[in-house]
Image: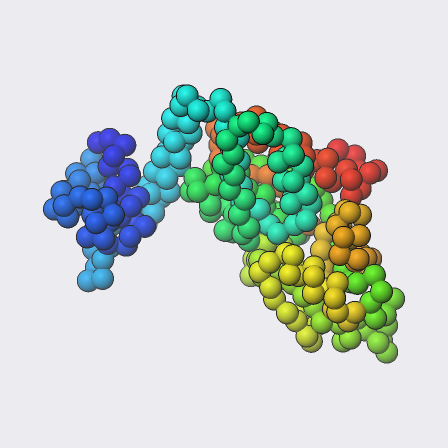
Amino acid sequence: MNNILHLKYAVEVEKAGSISRAAETLFLAQPHLSKAIRELESSLGAAIFKRTSRGVIPTARGKEFLRRARVVLKQLEGMEEVFRPSSSIRHALDLCVPPACYLSDALSAYLQSLNPDKEVDIHFRHSHANGTMNRVADGENDLGILRYQTIYEPYYRKALQDKELRYKEIWEFSYLLLSARNGALPESETAGDPVSSSCTLVLHGEISLSATGKGQEGVSGWNAFRKKIIVYDKATQLELVSRFPDYCSFEPPMSKEVLSRYDLVQRTFPLPDNRYKDVLIFRSGYEFTDDDLIYYKKIKEAIRDIEPSMEM
């Protein structure tokens, strides 16, 4: 291995898909960057990139090398941050999570707990299950919250192991039917007037991948609904369900405060295999910061507010 600079070069080449474009971004001469990549490949004894007429693409071994390189660069960035003079006056949080009201509630509670005199640098991104695993494994996010159906737990446990990720269980729950408090939906699913026939289902776009595994789409059972609206913003989803009496959605248990704010109610609904887990995932060897631990504490408090009798 030559040096850290070569790792940065390789990661930038992968991002650009072209040595010439990467050279422009790095303010380097193309021959210099090409030479650096060749030297790196020579020191590894394997090609990182395959040259094509349209640029470069990672080889199979190159993909694994680049994944580890991104993690190393992320860790080095964290080490540098610790020793910067400003680190003692800075709050930082870097997460990739499924769209969930309780996680937003926890973020609000975390923000309220911060020292107002400190700088704040927070990244709070939504993604589906596979996207979350990849982003954490690649070092693009420090932490992730992975959501999956419990029937697919062996699949996700193996995927986490293969990506050298660790996990800590947060919550196990069932999805509930969400509708306007004064909505027009029938009280129960009956043969004469099923909810799936009378209701327009409003789902968050990420739910099609975040709540399921192994090729399924969406919450199990949602395809029975003839009318569907997919949105990519949680507030829009809740607002639509609140405003239209024949609109509904499926959501994990929500706090009384959120339900009251949007004038919504939740109730059980017959869905197949309706047990899900949210787990906190992180890279092997990752050391939790004080801010990570504060946010995790706020997550557990948010769950307690939803299910006071839950054993933590």
Where is residue 9? Give x, y as percent: 25, 41
**Residue shown at 49% from the left, 36% from the top:** 121
Query: Is 5 above or below relative to 52?
Result: above
The answer to which quarter of the image holds residue 248 is bottom right
The answer to which quarter of the image holds residue 105 is top right
Query: Is 37 above or below relative to 187?
Result: above
Q: Could you tell whether 5 is left or right of 35 in the image?
A: right
Where is residue 110? Give x, y as percent: 63, 35
Where is residue 205? Give x, y as percent: 58, 61
Q: Could you tell whether 51 is left or right of 272 in the image?
A: left
Image quarter where the N terminus lies is top left
Image quarter where the C terminus lies is top right
**Residue 291 visible in the displayed image:** yes
**Residue 1 visible in the displayed image:** no
Q: Nearer the viewer, residue 25 or 46?
A: 25
Q: Extreme bottom residue here?
A: 192
Q: Extreme front residue here?
A: 117
Q: Could you tell whether 216 is left or right of 248 in the image?
A: left
Q: Nearer the viewer, residue 210 or 84?
A: 84
The answer to which quarter of the image holds residue 241 is bottom right
**Residue shown at 53% from the left, 41% from the top:** 95
Q: Nearer the viewer, residue 243 or 57?
A: 243
**Residue shown at 48% from the left, 41% from the top:** 141
**Residue shown at 28% from the left, 39% from the top:** 8
Query: Is 160 above or below relative to 182?
Result: above
Where is residue 70? Give x, y as percent: 37, 39
Question: How is the protein colored in the picture?
Answer: rainbow
Q: Nearer the viewer, residue 257 or 54?
A: 257
How many numbered callouts?
0
